[in-house]
Image (cartoon, grey):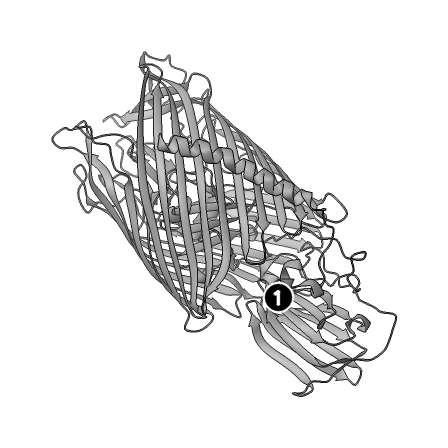
Amino acid sequence: MLVKLLYAVISTLIPILCITVANSAYGEQLSAEVRSASEVQSAKTSATYLLRIPKKQNKVTQLSQATSDVVSVTDVKVNATDKGIELILVTQNSQKLQVKGRIDGNSYIADIPNAQLQLASGESFQQLKPAVGIAEVTVASVDTNTLRVTVVGETGAPVVNLFDSTQEGLVFGVSAAASTAQKPTTTPQQQPQTEQNQPPIELEVTAQPDTYRVPDTNVGTKTNTPLRDIPQSIQVIPRQVLDDQKAQNFSDALRNTGIIGALVPASTNADIFTIRGFQQSRVILRNGLRDPSRIDSGRTQLTNIERIEVLKGPGSVLYGQQSPGGTVNYITKQPLSDPYFAANMSVGNYDFYQPALDISGPLNSDKTALYRLNFSYNNSGSFIDFLSSRNLLIAPVFAFRLDKNTTFKLEGEFLDQQQDSVNNGLPASGTVLPNPNGKIPLNRNVSEPTDSNFRYSTLLNYSLEHKFNDNWALRNAFHVRFVRNNQDIFFPTGFLSDGRTLNRIKSSFNGPALENTYVMDTNVVGKFKTGNIEHELLIGFDLFRDFFASENIVRQAGSLDLFNPIYGQPLGSITSTSNTKTRNDALGLYVQDQVKLFNNLKLILGGRLDFTENEVTNFITSQTTSQSDSVFSPRVGIIYQPIEPVSLYASYSQSFTQNVGATFDGSLFEPSRGTQYEVGVKTDLLNNKLSATLALYQLTLSNVLTQDLVHPSFNIQTGEQESRGVELNVIGEILPGWNVIASYNYTYAQITSDNRYKVGNFLVNVPENSASLWTTYIIPNGNLRGLGGGFGIFYVGARQGDLNNSFSVPSYLQLDAALYYRRNNLRLALNLKNLSDVRYFTPRSATQVYPSDPFTVVLTAGWEF
């Protein structure tokens, strides 16, 4: 009842608060202005006004003035900002300066032909590494009347904008190229900033660069934080990797992280995977909000995904109930401030084809309203008999700058997934184990040609951010997802000793199953100091509600001879029925402090209190049962940087998942708890173009349900499972045009306490060793510019097929390759997957072992501008 009451009160108040904030923002006259540098109160504010253009533009505009008078620059200052630096040329006549800017490789160079440098310290100014992503700043005289400003970026040319300051002089606002995919530009004309003559405000837009390395992430702290400042292993799969590999689904993407892909392979209709030995429990994040999807109820489409962030280990301190192994966060594509258009068509074997469209741009002249629309249609057959699927995705996004401090985004997604028949695997006997009848054909389908499965999903989302000042902000986000899912599937129940006959049942929904999910997250984030100690404080709460209702009928089905199948046999009697509605409510209160004790010593302290409630209504028995739990989840981490590019870290964190049910004596189950200790090192190499993480961890899952030996039809919570391992991840650019993403994982995951399974048995589908390497090279210059290729190696060791460890599946090595041609607006790619046509298997049980996809070819042609 407490959860219900709090949920009702808070869910009523927060929308009112958000509307009030938005109305107050509109109550002020909507500004179409960017403040001049003279209005900036402190050095840290000016970078927030930097304007950006889409990554496809590469033009530099000259700034001119009517006068040619020589102006004296008496001092040069460099101030740190939240996005880079301010480079200030101190002069009393900044309006007379003539600035001619250009891009040269990783450098922004501006010549000022009517200026003289008159510094007390000498004739030039230089500062090395003034900020992350900026290698060098130089101001020097070219001749007696010409001044040159050079800013060198570490990963690319920096983003530069110019401002006048009547108090100080000419201000160059500089941010590192790594933070945006948009290339630098100067303002079209430098003018005195007055109330009647100011440039319009633009919605600040960030997108991922055309490189593999992503330096910052939100998933580890709910704030934009450099990866090396987070004491936990995090991997980011950027859009460029997805495009280079032509990843079609969740499994294709996650194999780059060392995660043992999906527990169920790509030919099924579900996102199921394991991280650090533990299977995920429905919880996936979308732009930082929980976006659960019930098992076997749909696969994520990647068309509108900008990147995938994988947080290894417990994340309950920020996101509530989840698997101890880790968290996957999808970041969707956001609107761009200048027009953008991309159209692609992919075709391949097994009747695969996929047209896709991605368009974006401003909705008004001052670029305070932007949009983006992604569309794709995916049709695919399979090597498995009568198995095919069709997926339609429509995903619009709108972003609005309500005023200089308030932004509002509205996002939608409609997904229509249709699947003919279902892949439920094959028995271990005849695939990975001997069978007296020989090998079962791998294209055999144990389901029926008439099986079908459809899923309609509609998502609506908004996010609102209001900055009170440069240090404090309020953020609120909400999304609702409506799902309608139909199931009409044959399941295997046992394989007879003759090695031929598979017993089956048929499970059908009497009408579509309904699932509605509501999620709201509200927090305040702020920066302040206590003495010389810097803090970034996050305080917030989130609300979660999930309804799931279904009426299910299970019948006996005709057995199937896997060596001579006869489909279409009559169904048997009904063995069970169910008609239930399940409601899950959760309220989470969280706090986190990122503490900077010194420049090279940082702490993260966090804690969260969750209130969860599960209620199940059985319409057949007219009974309702409920269970409530409250759980506290802590996290402590420390980061030490002996030198700037290297971070040594250690952390302790916990997670939880609710266990619904009771013991024989009626005692309700306690939540399962995941507890992790992790140490590691993170480093940035090759001038911050290449990043690597080495992590060692021990992760224990306690309060696991296991059989009550005294009352065998009940469970008790004495089970425990443990995973220990080492992970090495490398991602980035080795040389210009040469990118790489690689990982190695050693995982030792076993049962440490159980009444049913032997202690020491290994967990299902978890190899001790796994590794991946994907690398591409695109010729950057010359007549062959844009021509290139890619090559990938993916290794997975032997894995156990069940908790009894009664059988295992062998290791495998898969090879992929690709050819590319990218010139001007044209994009061509030929992707070859599973070059050696190796046949490997993914186990789920003794009756469900899934064969891999054979050699496949995908040809893609695209046009982008």
Q: Is residue 341 visible?
A: no
- What residue is disc 1 on? 42
The quadrant in which residue 558 appears is top left
In this image, 457 relative to 102: left or right? left
Q: Is residue 776 visible?
A: yes
- Relative to 18, is 84 above or below? below
Q: Amino acid at mark 1?
A: Ser
Seen from the viewer's position, the closer of residues 283 and 842 is 283
Residue 597 place in picture, x, y as percent: 41, 68
Q: Residues within 10 Å of mark 1 (few under 14, many from 20)?
A: few
Residue 856 place in picture, x, y as percent: 51, 42
Q: Residue at x 62, y 73 (%)?
A: 78
- Relative to 443, is 588 above or below? below
The total of numbered circles placed on residues is: 1
- Name the outermost residue toward the left: 710
- Relative to 10, is 792 above or below? below
The quadrant in which residue 776 appears is bottom right
Where disc 1 sits, the SS reads loop
The quadrant in which residue 429 appears is top left
Seen from the viewer's position, the closer of residues 551 and 162 is 162
Q: Quadrant of the N terminus?
A: top left
Residue 655 place in picture, x, y as percent: 33, 46
In this image, 659 relative to 271: left or right? left
- Name the outermost residue toward the right: 66
Residue 171 place in picture, x, y as percent: 70, 69
